[in-house]
Amino acid sequence: MSNPYVLPDGNVQISFSGGRTSAYMLHQILEANDGLPDRAVVTFANTGREMPETLDFVHDCSIQWGVPIVWLEYDRPDNKVFYKKTDYKLASRNGEPFELLIKSKKYLPNPTARFCTSELKILTMKRFLTKGLGWKEWSACIGIRADERHRVKKDANERWRQWYPLVDAMVSKEDVNSFWANKSFDLKLDNSSGSTPKGNCDFCFLKSEAVLASMSRQYPERVKWWAKMEDEIGISFRSGRKLSEFVDFVNKQQDWVFDDESFFCQSDDGECTG
């Protein structure tokens, strides 16, 4: 049986989200291919709202495994949409790329218009590959596991073909957890039954109210940027939930509400990936 992690022919972009699953995928690809040839590139798109631990983890993977990771950010030089290359030290940490996008759009992303994912991640990486590297077409390697197969997209694209090696390898969240349990370094964010509630953008509007409530207690300073964007644009990231009012409500509650699964809305539309 062929190794599911062997690179397909042609140019290959390995999208690293900064989480445990995509890092596991990167490790397996490196092992199967004895490193990476010049036709393969690893990209990380920074929105400026990732937790510091995520940025540390991306940097650690690069250093520990000796693999170059291209750090990218959404940019608008001369008010024309483009990308910016950055690195661990210079990466935005106060939402600058995200804020730039919001102010250019003059409205906020929401569960039905998730332009933040497409612009800050997918299209930013595409602009780098086409304009920076001159690629005409490529295989886009995406870290989706076999136990989340419902997220797989087979849409035809004029530029890239999706490649899901973890699905082909039948990898589950238990496999990923076992891998990191035996490693000398790890993502220093809570692992809750195979998911990372604090991963991706810190106060992403797709996170459940229970997660947002907990984070607002633990990281009150990090919600301020999101509330500021809502105030400046005049709408909310999620209809019916103004973050400043939600946080004020949470702060008035006693600690027992965090142990009552029925107190906060537990629905979760699924966080972004990239």
Image (tube, rainbow, N blue to C red):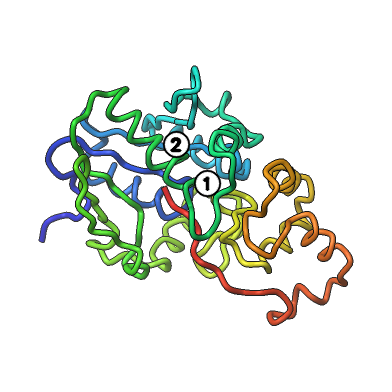
Q: Residue at x 73, y 63 (%)?
A: 213
Q: Front-most of 100 and 165? A: 100
Q: Amino acid at mark 1?
A: Phe
Expressed as whole percent of the image width and height from the top left, the position of residue 204 reads 59, 54
Expressed as whole percent of the image width and height from the top left, the position of residue 163 reads 23, 51
Q: CA distance from mark 2 to mark 1?
A: 9 Å
Identify whether 204 is placed above or below 60: below
Q: Are marks 2 and 1 in contact (CB under 8 Å)?
A: yes
> What is the secondary structure assignment of the residue under circle 1?
loop
Label 1, residues with CA under 10 Å away: few <14, some 14-19, many ≥20: few
The residue under label 2 is 64
Q: Residue at x 63, y 50 (%)?
A: 202
In the picture, which quadrant includes the N terminus?
bottom left
Expressed as whole percent of the image width and height from the top left, the position of residue 135 reads 22, 29
Identify whether 215 is placed above or below 17: below
Q: Front-most of 116 and 274? A: 116
Q: Residue at x 18, y 47 (%)?
A: 6
The disc at residue 97 is none
Q: Amino acid at mark 2?
A: Gln
Q: Is residue 136 left or right of residue 30?
A: left
Identify whether 41 is placed above or below 157: above
The residue under label 1 is 185
> What is the secondary structure assignment of the residue under circle 2?
helix
Expressed as whole percent of the image width and height from the top left, the position of residue 134 reads 23, 24
Label 2, residues with CA under 10 Å away: few <14, some 14-19, many ≥20: few
Q: Front-most of 1 and 237? A: 237
Identify whether 187 is placed above or below 123: below
Specify the farthest residue to the top: 78
